[in-house]
Image (spheres, grey):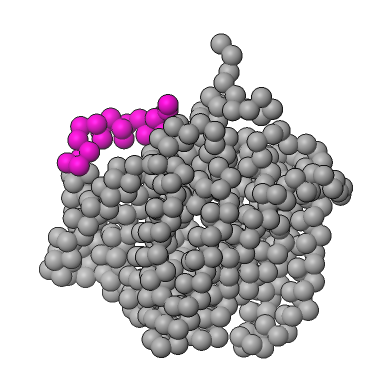
């Protein structure tokens, strides 16, 4: 039987896309889920061993480098993944050449302005070396781009996850051990360098590719037609996130940014646990099925439900147990001021669970200008509300600003449904209702229980029972069968 192709020039069939997408979701939500647990456990230890100021310095310096890193690409990597036709050597070599030149220029700029950065944020010698380490890490990361694109385009996530596994293990182990030994901010410096080297070696071992300097004008022009709008979106996202952190660093100081960073790290943890893995798979998968409208609609509904089903109760559960955890962990009382920001950031995470997948889908089907418009809206709102709220109300105000911006995501939902009419009720509203019903009894139960580890387990178990019971009531007997066949049914026609 002849395989069904989305396009006669494509290198893999629709059937292969579906099979590899299913496997990719399983791999990334399985193995990488375990690594996310490791990362959060490591963060827990780091926030015990390090002060809010040290944590804040890492957050500020990382934001500076991430902001500059934006300019190391012009969207060519995303264009290679989204391209319908088979990639050529000219595409790969041109992308590598352009990106390498841009990265070298960025590093030169970073080194030249480093004294200003050190002076402006009053960085210690350790903070200065961390800045240089992150710069080196940016260069090493750029060398992995082409092998990573080749695996991601072919949906070979079983291979792609291995370097991520090794990087995560090495980074967290080195950072925690050195922080425990009293290295302070230098723990991050050494961990970042170790992560970069290990990831680069692992990537080229799994997907050998010989770097070559070459430039093809036609290939460059073709890729830019998608790459420029995509990169414009990335610029706005960078200004909205890392650019905002850089500015808030001047308003709130390292200690304030440390508290806000703690709230963002934990408040966004459910997204990192569950959403990122699905997004990683669905962008190349949806790009390949962009002409299969009905199939895309069903797949989008299932993917959003999968994310919301896991993220919504996780966010609610986190808000319920966070005050107890802060109270029972030794040396963790310093993070009590971050509990209110955590609540505000969590509102943003609820909306992001839906809208991130929607913008991801719009990009995959070539509606990059629509995403650009949405990003303009979010960026403008961020720069209006967050700095103002931070100046007026400090850390709590900044977090509230993020929450206000998150509420505007309702616009993105209505816009996206004009292009892919997914089921909002089945994918979002029912899981949201179940999470809300779960929250109400937990509020009263937490007040009645003492601050102890046993209370945490009681809250988690009670919340899980209530949530699953409500989900079962809303979806009926079919839900059990759907859970059993989650991955096999994910892209089923």
- The mark tally for this picture is 0
Question: In the shown orientation, is residue 387 left or right of residue 152?
Answer: left
Residue stretch in magenta: 472-493
Q: Main secondary structure of the magenta part?
A: helix
Image quarter where the N terminus lies is top right
The x and y percentages for residue 251 are: 51, 86
The x and y percentages for residue 250 are: 55, 86
Q: Is residue 15 placed above or below 341 in the rendered structure?
A: above
**Of the pair 256 and 69, the residue shown nearer to us:** 69
Name which residue lies at 72% across and 51% down.
224
Name which residue lies at 63% across and 28% down.
7
Q: Is residue 258 placed above or below 460 in the rendered structure?
A: below
Residue 479 part of the magenta segment = yes
- Does residue 145 appear in the picture of this structure? no
Question: In the shown orientation, is residue 65 left or right of residue 449?
Answer: right
Image quadrant assignment for residue 403: bottom left
Q: Is residue 108 placed above or below 254 in the rendered structure?
A: above
The x and y percentages for residue 271 are: 42, 56
């Amino acid at each position: 039987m002849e395989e069904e192709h989305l396009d006669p020039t494509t290198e893999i069939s629709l059937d292969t896309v579906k099979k590899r997408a299913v496997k990719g979701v399983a791999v990334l939500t399985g193995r990488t889920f375990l690594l996310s647990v490791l990362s959060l456990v490591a963060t827990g230890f780091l926030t015990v061993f390090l002060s809010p100021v040290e944590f804040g310095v890492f957050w500020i310096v990382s934001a500076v480098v991430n902001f500059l890193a934006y300019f190391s690409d012009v969207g060519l990597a995303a264009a290679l993944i989204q391209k319908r036709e088979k990639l050529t050597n000219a595409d790969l070599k041109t992308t590598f050449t352009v990106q390498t030149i841009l990265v070298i220029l960025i590093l030169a700029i970073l080194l030249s302005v480093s004294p200003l950065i050190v002076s402006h944020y009053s960085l210690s010698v350790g903070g200065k070396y961390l800045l240089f380490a992150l710069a080196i890490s940016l260069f090493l990361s750029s060398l992995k781009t082409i092998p990573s694109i080749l695996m991601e385009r072919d949906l070979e996530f079983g291979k792609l996850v291995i370097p991520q596994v090794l990087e995560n293990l090495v980074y967290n182990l080195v950072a925690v051990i050195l922080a425990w030994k009293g290295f302070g901010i230098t723990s991050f410096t050494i961990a970042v360098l170790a992560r970069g080297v290990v990831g680069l070696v692992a990537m080229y071992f799994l997907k050998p590719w010989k770097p070559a300097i070459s430039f093809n004008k036609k290939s460059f022009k073709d890729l830019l037609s998608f790459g420029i709008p995509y990169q414009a979106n990335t610029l706005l996202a960078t200004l909205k996130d890392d650019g905002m952190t850089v500015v808030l660093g001047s308003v709130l100081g390292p200690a304030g940014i440390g508290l806000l960073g703690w709230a963002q790290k934990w408040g966004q943890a459910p997204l990192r646990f569950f959403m990122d893995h699905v997004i990683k798979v669905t962008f190349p998968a949806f790009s390949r099925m962009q002409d299969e409208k009905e199939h895309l609609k069903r797949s989008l509904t299932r993917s959003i439900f999968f994310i919301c089903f896991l993220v919504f109760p996780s966010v609610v559960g986190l808000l319920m147990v966070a005050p107890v955890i802060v109270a029972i962990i030794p040396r963790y009382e310093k993070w009590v001021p971050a509990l209110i920001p955590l609540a505000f950031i969590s509102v943003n995470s609820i909306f992001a669970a839906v809208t991130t997948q929607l913008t991801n889908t719009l990009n995959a089907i070539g509606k990059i200008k629509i995403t650009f418009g949405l990003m303009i809206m979010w960026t403008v709102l961020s720069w209006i509300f967050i700095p103002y709220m931070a100046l007026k109300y400090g850390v709590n105000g900044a977090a509230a600003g993020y929450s206000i911006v998150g509420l505007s995501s309702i616009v993105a939902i209505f816009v996206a449904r004009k292009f892919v009419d997914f089921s909002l009720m089945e994918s979002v509203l029912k899981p949201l209702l179940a999470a809300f019903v779960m929250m109400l009894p937990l509020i009263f139960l937490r007040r009645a229980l003492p601050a102890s580890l046993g209370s945490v387990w009681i809250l988690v178990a009670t919340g899980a029972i209530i949530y699953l019971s409500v989900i079962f009531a809303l979806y009926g007997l079919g839900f059990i069968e759907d859970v059993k066949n989650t991955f096999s049914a994910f892209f089923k026609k």
